Amino acid sequence: MFSLLQKFKEGLTKTKDKLVHEIKRIVTLSPKLTGASLEEIEMALLSADLGMAVTEQICREARKAYETQGRAGLDFLEIARREVEKSLTNAAAPLALQPSGVTVVSMVGVNGTGKTTTSAKLAHHVRGRGQTSMLAACDTFRAAAIDQLKLWGERLNVPVIASQYGSDPAAVAHDAVVAAQAQQMNYLFVDTAGRLHTKHNLMLELIKVHRVMDKKMPGAPHETLLVLDGSTGMNALNQAKEFNKAVKITGLVITKLDGTSKGGMVVGIHRELGLPIKFIGLGEKPEDLQPFDSKEFAAALFSE
């Protein structure tokens, strides 16, 4: 039986193993909760990129439990799990769906975060819910991106709107909206080019792509998902802030969490930005993109 908790546990193995191993080692070596052992635990939590605010929250609760119940009442992993879940209470949010017509979803982010693959996986995800979708190859800078999206389209049997390498991404986006409306699709996933958040001209181009879609279909894109690479940890924070200034980000997709021990960044980034986490990527296969679930995430992070 496929279990979401199992999926999260497998995907977060690297982060979980490092965290749980470190915490157990520290707690075993120091039967009393001393200032020094608490400092070590703090370092372990920070090295998983949980962020300062949540790390301090966990340590504060652990100290409180130790002071009131002594060593016997201190289940550090349980306290950490509870506090992480608490800090992620409002983190999960479903993918937007317009009451009628096409829901346009723009995929944005820096180079190499996995936007193209994520766009295809989202098409696979909505099909699992019985909905139709179309993909738009608006990364016209990278010839490989167009080919990659077309390959995914063939593999998943999802139509792809594409143009020549080097063509105007806004024109492709316009044509894709027209096609998605004509074919009465539920979703249009727009794969935009990777761009550094510091490159002003590229950010302006992204704004233009959005403006053109909005002109063709008022309100589009209905969802702008920022795709972040989990292995960059809290460094992704600046990217998120800059993208959010240029185009209103409605949610985050955090990919490549299976390959990093910095999986705590999901917690740290949500705490800093307050943006919902729509999906997390836990592997290569289409079904490895999972809707975010705060309870299962916290349980998987601190499970023994």
Image (cartoon, rainbow, N blue to C red):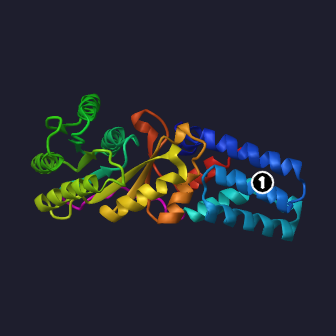
Q: Is residue 255 visible?
A: yes
Q: Position of residue 110 (x, y in %)?
A: 37, 47
Does the magenta portion include 161?
Answer: no
Left or right: residue 231 versus residue 141 is right
Q: Quadrant of the N terminus?
A: top right
In this view, the residue in front, 192 or 253, is: 192
* Magenta stretch, residue numbers: 89-100
Q: Position of residue 178 (x, y in %)?
A: 10, 50
Does the magenta portion include 97?
Answer: yes
In this view, the residue in front, 24 or 200, is: 200
* Amino acid on which the number 1 mark rests in the picture: Glu
Left or right: residue 108 versus residue 34 is left
Q: Quadrant of residue 207?
A: bottom left
In percent of the image, x 15 and y 64: which residue is there?
218
Q: Tally the marks.
A: 1
Instruction: Identify the secondary structure beneath mark 1.
Output: helix
Q: Position of residue 259 (x, y in %)?
A: 54, 37
Q: Badge 1, how many Cα within 10 Å: few under 14, some, many 20+?
A: some
Q: Which residue is mark 1?
A: 40
Prevailing SS of the magenta stretch: loop
Left or right: residue 92 versus residue 203 is right
Left or right: residue 144 versus residue 73 is left
Residue 141, placed above or below residue 170? above
In this view, the residue in front, 284 or 199, is: 199
Q: Position of residue 199 (x, y in %)?
A: 32, 53
